[in-house]
Amino acid sequence: MTIKQGNVAITGEVTEQEARQLEQSLEETRSGRLGAFSLMMLSDDDIQEEMKHDPLYVSDSLADIREALEAHRRVTELMETAVNRLEGMRG
């Protein structure tokens, strides 16, 4: 079985380089994850206030959060494949 993880094809085994790429993509999206947490603690009025001071607040935050979400999806797919592989070996 082959699953496409961004630019990485997973066929049951992952090379060390592929694993490092996936891990690095998660590390690089840390600000997006923190941004999502922070955003969910703000009221709509707080967000409107932020936009007055930083007109790009919404578009920048949205881009960061989307990037983080995609990285998490790729890693989640990998983890699901690993679970399925182990479950298949249990018989």
Image: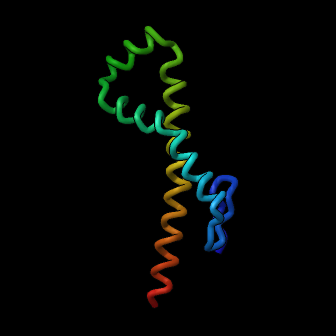
Residue 22 % position (x, y): 58, 53
- Residue sitting at the far bottom: 91
| Position of residue 79 in the picture relative to residue 15 (left or right) | left
- Residue sitting at the far top: 53
| Position of residue 39 in the picture relative to residue 31 (left or right) | left
Relative height, residue 81 to residue 28 (above, below): below
Relative height, residue 39 to residue 3 (above, below): above
User: Which residue corresponds to the image point at 65% horizontal and 53% vertical from the top-left?
Assistant: 6
- The answer to whether residue 73 is visible is yes
Q: Report which quarter residue 11 is drawn in.
A: bottom right
Relative height, residue 8 to residue 35 (above, below): below
Residue 60 % position (x, y): 53, 25
**Residue placed most toward the observer, 39 or 44:** 39
Q: Quadrant of the N terminus?
A: bottom right
Residue 76 % position (x, y): 49, 58
Relative height, residue 67 to residue 74 (above, below): above
User: Which residue corresponds to the image point at 54% horizontal and 63% vertical from the top-left?
Assistant: 78
User: Which residue corresponds to the image point at 52% horizontal and 46% vertical from the top-left?
Assistant: 26
| Position of residue 43 in the picture relative to residue 4 (left or right) | left
User: Which residue corresponds to the image point at 49% horizontal and 86% vertical from the top-left?
Assistant: 89
